[in-house]
Image (cartoon, rainbow, N blue to C red):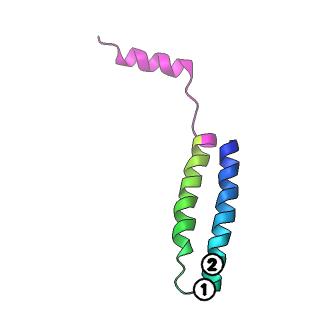
Amino acid sequence: RRDFSSNIVSYIVVNAALLLVWYFTGRGYFWPAWILWCWGVGLLLHAWTIWGRKPITEDDVRRERARLQPR
């Protein structure tokens, strides 16, 4: 979870800098959207692995081992 919070800070700082570069270089094609989108998807997947996934329990392991046993 600590890694996630540092990733959020990096996302904000780096993308703010990229937006400033885009703004002060003529505001043409909005190229920062590519970085914002791709990195944002990565952050969402990281958040899902932290808070969205169900942890594996011992019961899950036992069930899977029983399923894989040759009959």
What residue sits 66% from the left and 58% below the top?
Answer: 10
Label 2, secondary structure: give it: helix
Q: Are marks 1 and 2 in contact (CB under 8 Å)?
A: yes
In the rendered image, which quarter is residue 16 located in?
Answer: bottom right
Q: Amino acid at mark 1?
A: Thr
**Front in this rendered view, residue 53 or 33:** 33
Count of numbered marks: 2
Residue that badge 1 annotates: 25
- Neighbour class for label 1 at 10 Å: few (<14), some, many (≥20)? few
Q: Would you say the magenta stretch is mainly helix, strand or loop?
A: helix
Residue 53 magenta-highlighted: yes
Q: Where's residue 35, x and y in %? A: 54, 67
In the rendered image, which quarter is residue 53 located in?
Answer: top right
In the rendered image, which quarter is residue 3 located in?
Answer: top right
What residue sits 38% from the left and 18% below the top?
Answer: 67
Check the picture and name the quadrant holding the N terminus.
top right
Check the picture and name the quadrant holding the C terminus.
top left
What residue sits 30% from the left and 12% below the top?
Answer: 70
- Neighbour class for label 2 at 10 Å: few (<14), some, many (≥20)? few
Label 1, secondary structure: give it: loop
Q: Where's residue 14, x and y in %? A: 64, 65
Residue that badge 2 annotates: 21
Q: Where's residue 6, x and y in %? A: 69, 50
Residue 62 magenta-highlighted: yes
Residue stretch in magenta: 50-71
Q: CA distance from mark 1 to mark 2?
A: 6 Å
What residue sits 66% from the left and 77% below the top?
Answer: 20
